[in-house]
Image (cartoon, rainbow, N blue to C red):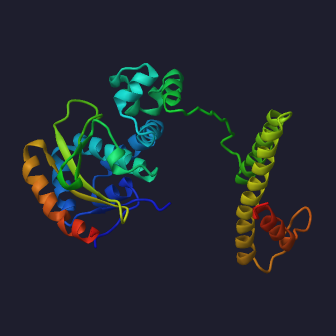
Amino acid sequence: MAAWKLEPSPFFDSRFKRFQKKHANEAKAILNNLDTYVSTLNEGVHPINIKAGFIHHEPDGIKAIDQKGGKGKLMQSRLYIYPHTETKTLHVISIGNKTDQKGDINECRDYIKPLRKGKG
Amino acid sequence: MGKKYNNVLEMTKDISDEEDFNKALEEEIKNKQISKALFAMRCKAGLTQKELAEKAGFTQGKISKIENAFDNELTLNDLTKYCSAINMQIEIGFSNMETRLVDRVKHHYFALMECLIEMRHLAKGDKSIEEGVEKFHEEAFANITTGMLDCLLKVKIKEEKKPLHVSSPIDLKALLERREKALTPK
């Protein structure tokens, strides 16, 4: 069984660096949750069946992973991903605060449009 | 198409320049292997935290805590209850840290033999179960020899000129014929 691959968006790098600088603990907690998510995908579980408090199901199959489980008092944060089951590629799109959620989700929806079209 | 990574750590190390951050993340992921495996097993079983909590006699909060715990925070009692709620059992094994790979292969061979012997003992006296066990032995033989043959052929391709040291000569042709026979429905 082929393992899932992670593919960051072209703008993820700069977003992540900015976020990490201000909120290192939140970034660590989110990445740890992302690792749990990827491990579960690699166990052959369909994204629909991955249910936990740190996963939020957004429109168009986008998932938002939050900082739950991290140590200390952490700010509400979101990492936006899109699991493309046909290619077993987990698109890591963006990261941000809860306050920027609406704009971030719209941006993610635009980003995955061609991927969803390619799905046929 | 952008760059692809095999896992979160590989991606983070490539993106983040913060050495301490990367180290701390690596440590955390390494120390949560069991809870991550439990989480995956629950999802595979198609259960929510609430459903699993009811089966295990825990609260949902307790399940959440277990799924986020460091390996050294988990108790055997929690693990046993969690696993039995998803029809899994815990197997604890101890091995010498200096155990070589060849010894591990031998260990698995003996463990396999023990399982097959136990299976035959359990089936004794019941004709239908005995037949089932016989069939399973045939299937296991075919599968194991196929896998072993594959490994053997790979070794032979890489080291064609070196003699193969085995306790007795292996007749590959006969092995393949036996495998074919075992796979052919009666």
Identify whether B111 is placed above or below A103.
above
B26 left or right, relative to B77: left
Residue furthest toward the bottom? B161
Q: Is residue B101 left or right of residue B177?
A: left
In the rendered image, the vertical position of residue B86 relative to residue B170, given as above or below:
above
Residue B110: give x, y in percent of width and height: 79, 44
**Among all residues in the image, which is located at the extreme right?**
B168
Q: Nearer the viewer, residue B94 or B98?
A: B94
Q: Nearer the viewer, residue B177 or B131?
A: B131
**Can you say which quadrant of the picture contains the C terminus of chain B?**
bottom right
From this viewpoint, is residue B23 visible?
Answer: no
Can you tell which quarter of the image residue A117 is in?
Answer: bottom left
Q: Is residue A49 visible?
A: yes
Q: Quadrant of the N terminus of chain B?
A: bottom left
- Percent across and percent down for residue B21 are 30, 47
Q: Is residue B30 left or right of residue B147?
A: left
Task: Please report the residue visible at 27 percent of the width from the left and 70 percent of the height from the top.
Answer: A120
Q: Which residue occupies the foreground of this view, B119 or B61?
A: B119
Name the image quarter holding residue B174: bottom right
Reply above or below: B147 against B100.
below
Residue at 40% across, 22% down: B54
